[in-house]
């Protein structure tokens, strides 16, 4: 059915649990997988104990994000299993859902496969839903795993 799955990963338990289902889907369809991790391009302001802030350089921020993305990809590959060889894509974007959509274009995926935190009610309103944003703005099908 699908030949190339784009799978956003973030290292969360929800993301990790969905990877077994992703592996099953890829095996059933003989599909390729691209894992995508989105990091914020802007370094955060970190405060010391004395309320005096100090900034992190853009270069240092990128190094930390790259290292974290590599770790997330390594753990995700373990969850997928040794039979599946997934490509990886690390994107710096200030908006998570837009970063995922950019990843879909760059990887030339034909479906986006996402996990959902299943937030409802006031939590959904306050915390938002990146999955919902991707569904609304994607030109590709979005498969949501629960």
Image: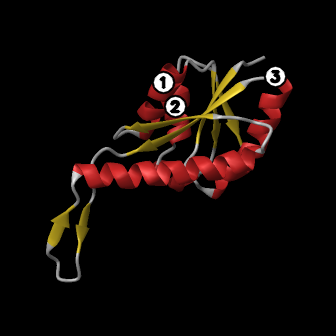
- Name which quarter of the figure residue 115 lies in: top right
Whole-number angstrom distance, CA of label 3 to CA of label 2: 23 Å
Left-right relation of 134 to 46? right
Q: Is residue 58 visible?
A: yes
Circle nearer the viewer, 3 or 2: 3
> SS of the residue at dot 1?
helix
| Label 3: which secondary element | helix
x and y percent of residue 113 in the render?
Answer: 65, 33
Q: Which quadrant of the rendered structure holds the C terminus?
A: top right
- Residue 40 horizontal side relative to residue 9, left or right: left
Which is more N-terminal, label 1 or label 3?
3
Give the colour scheme of this rendering.
secondary structure
Please say if 117 is above or below 90: below
Q: Which residue is mark 2?
A: 134
Asked if marks 3 and 1 touch (Cβ < 8 Å), the reply is no
* Residue found at the very far left of the displayed protein: 52
The span from disc 3 to disc 1 (Cα, nearest Å) is 25 Å
Q: Which mark is residue 137?
A: 1
Which residue, as the protein is rendered here, is positioned at the far right?
A: 28
Which residue in the rendered view is the most extreme toward the bottom? 50
């Amino acid at each position: 059915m699908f030949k190339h799955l784009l799978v956003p990963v973030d290292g969360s338990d929800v993301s990790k649990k969905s990877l077994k289902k992703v592996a099953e889907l890829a095996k059933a369809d003989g599909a390729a997988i691209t894992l995508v991790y989105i990091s914020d391009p802007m370094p955060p302001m970190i405060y010391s104990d004395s309320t005096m802030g100090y900034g992190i350089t853009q270069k240092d921020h990128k190094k930390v994000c790259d290292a974290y993305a590599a770790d997330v990809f390594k753990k995700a590959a373990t969850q997928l299993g040794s039979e599946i060889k997934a490509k990886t894509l690390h994107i710096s974007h200030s908006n998570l859902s837009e970063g995922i959509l950019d990843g879909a274009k760059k990887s030339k995926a034909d479906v986006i496969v996402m996990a959902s935190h299943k937030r409802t009610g006031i939590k959904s309103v306050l915390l938002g839903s990146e999955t919902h944003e991707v569904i609304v703005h994607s030109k590709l099908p979005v498969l949501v795993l629960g």
